[in-house]
Amino acid sequence: MEKNKGLTSTGGFYLLYFGAVGCMFPYLNLYYQRIGLTGFQIGILSAIPSLVVPFASPIWGILGDSLNLHRRLLTVAVGGTIIPVLLLSAGRTMSWLAPVTLVYAFFYGPIGPLIDSTALQVAEAAHRSYGELRVWGTIGFIASAWTLGRIMEGTSLRSLFLGYALFMLGSLAFSLLLPSSPQRWSGPMLQGLGVLLADRVFVLFLASVFLLATAVAAANNFFALYMDGLGASEGLVGLSWAIAALSEVPVMFLSGALLRRLAPRGLLILGFSVYALRWFLYSQTTSLQAVLLIQVLHGLSFGAYFVAGVVYTRERAPGGLSATAQALFSGTVLGLAGIVGGLAGGYLYDQVGVMNLFRFCSLAATLALVVFLVVPSLHKRGPADCRTFSKLRGDQGASRSDDKEEGA
């Protein structure tokens, strides 16, 4: 019963949380444009979360792992986004919107790492795959983005703020039902971060996903402009994103089988490779029909890479540091890479055009794959890593505990 409750509450949280994201992500910049903000101002507001997440997420993750407060911190983070989002609808100037966005980003950043850490534990306890739980987020995103778009055709774009608040209130309720983490980091609070950053395998992994995520940010920022240049309507742009999201569903449902067959390392290699192919194909076509077909590769690129990345991060993290490790992964992907990708993508778009931008993204994905191939194939912490872990912990029992966990 407890296992079923954990599966239901985690799946329900993903469904409603990404339903909230589906209300905001596709429409927020369009709303800013409609209230008279310039492109530069919209860019600043879009960059604020990327600046905040790399710093905020690890702080929340360290607190969760050290104090074993993952569930309570998740509830605080979810609730903390609701009022700032509603306040965004009340302002029209940068002096109002920028500080409110800063507060929103501080609470929004840790939600992903905290729920992913919990979902991995719930899935493991129930002998299910992480992707089977995460797929409910994709379903929630598709449903809310499409439904809200239809609603806003007869109302206004301001409906997105109310939609977000309602979905997040539902997520808040589910967060109260999530199980507590069975593990806790027993060392000094900041030492856990040092343990993770001393792991050269994990650092190389973060370097590879940084390169890939930088290319993802650059490509995503200008994908709508790419389609617009090919003559696509707004509806066709929306359809292309729907096709991409739908292609994630089978990959996530089958992620358990894929991980058993390929292991996280193999699935990451697949995701990196398909991303390189996908962006190269975009750079070679001017057919909208071909673009829609290429969008189907989103599942085998993003779906494979993200699920495998979360699982790989869990495997590299010592016991009790899952949330901190996920925060480093999330901060790299959504924060640092988002900033660099946005700036580099804008520069390349202005200097060489969108087709060459996609070629550069394909090269970056290939380079990311090369960097990742340098990472040793051993997923679990090896003897050298265990010695480093024990040294940083400063106690001999840590090594014995870690060895037991390795053998489990």
Image (cartoon, rainbow, N blue to C red):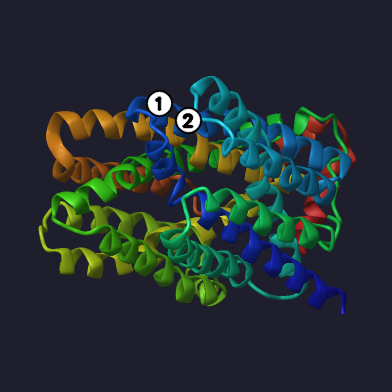
Q: Is residue 143 left or right of residue 405?
A: left
For the residue carrying disc 1, how many other residues have a C-alpha within 10 Å: few (<14), some (14-19), or many (20+)? some
User: Is there a contact, CB below 8 Å, between mark 1 and mark 2?
Assistant: yes
Quarter-of-image position of residue 31: top left
Could you tell whether 27 is left or right of 57 in the image?
A: left
For disc 2, the neighbor class at 10 Å (few under 14, some 14 to 19, many from 20) is many
State the residue in front, 396 or 13.
Answer: 13
Q: Quadrant of residue 221?
A: top left
Secondary structure, mark 1, is helix
Q: Residue at x 89, y 42 (%)?
A: 397
Please give the label number shown on residue 78: none
Instruction: Give the residue at mark 1.
Output: 41
Q: Is residue 382 visible?
A: no
- As measured in the structure, the alpha-carbon distance from the residue carrying label 1 to the one carrying label 2 is 6 Å
Q: Which residue is mark 2?
A: 45
The quarter of the picture where the C terminus appears is: bottom right
Which residue is drawn at the image coordinates 69% and 61% (left, top)? 120
* Relative height, residue 102 to residue 117 (above, below): above
Q: Residue at x 37, y 37 (%)?
A: 33
Which structural element holds mark 2? Answer: helix
Q: Toward the viewer: 80 or 122?
A: 80
| Figure check: 381 above or below 210 | below
Amino acid type for the residue under numbered disc 1:
Gln
